[in-house]
Amino acid sequence: MNKAVRNQILKLEREQVRAINRGDVRAALKMFDPRLVGFSSTRHERIRGLPALARTFHHYLRIAPRMNYSIAQAQVHVQGPVALATFYWTVGLGKGKKVHGRGSHVFTRKGKNWRVVHEHFSRAH
């Protein structure tokens, strides 16, 4: 696997984590393709497009304004113009309440850039 591609995708993931933790939805959306399709872990609905993803981010920030999102054990698998990032996530909702789960982002290459075209988050059971 191309180490530079892996590092580029991990950098995007880290930038997104920092943006969410700042409450910066616009920056958090940067790595996503406008035609994104995915699933939310808590609202259990399909997400289509950036406006729907922005609404989901805003929902989380409303219920937990001091939310702390983190990812761990991220792995990236690249096959041609497609890459898959998988990771474990934790969301701290304040007052000691945390939610854990698994996540995946499917990236496609757009020129020199990579954009998420599919996201799936699920809670750990």
Image: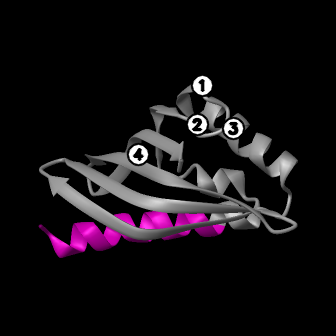
Callout 4: helix, strand or loop? strand
For disc 3, the marked residue is 56
As measured in the structure, the alpha-carbon distance from the residue carrying label 2 to the one carrying label 3 is 8 Å
Q: Distance between the residues labelled 2 and 4?
A: 15 Å
Whether tag 2 and tag 3 are in contact, CB under 8 A, the answer is yes
Highlighted magenta segment, given as a residue range:
1-18
The amino acid type of the residue labelled 3 equals: Thr
Q: What residue type is labelled 2?
A: Ser
Give the mark, 2 or 4, whose residue is nearer the N terminus.
2
State how far apart marks 1 and 2 are (Cα): 6 Å
Judging by the rendered image, the residue that carries numbered circle 4 is: 116
Asked if residue 11 is among those painted magenta in the image, a careful observer would answer yes
* Residue to which mark 2 is pinned: 40
Q: Nearer the viewer, residue 86 or 23?
A: 86
Q: Earlier in the sequence, mark 3 or mark 1?
A: 1
Q: Residue at 25% across / 52% down in the picture?
A: 83
What is the residue that sits farthest to the front in this orientation? 125
Q: Nearer the viewer, residue 30 or 73?
A: 73
Q: What element carries label 2?
A: loop
Task: Determine whether, in the image, residue 58 is placed left or right of residue 70.
Answer: right
Q: Which mark is residue 45?
A: 1
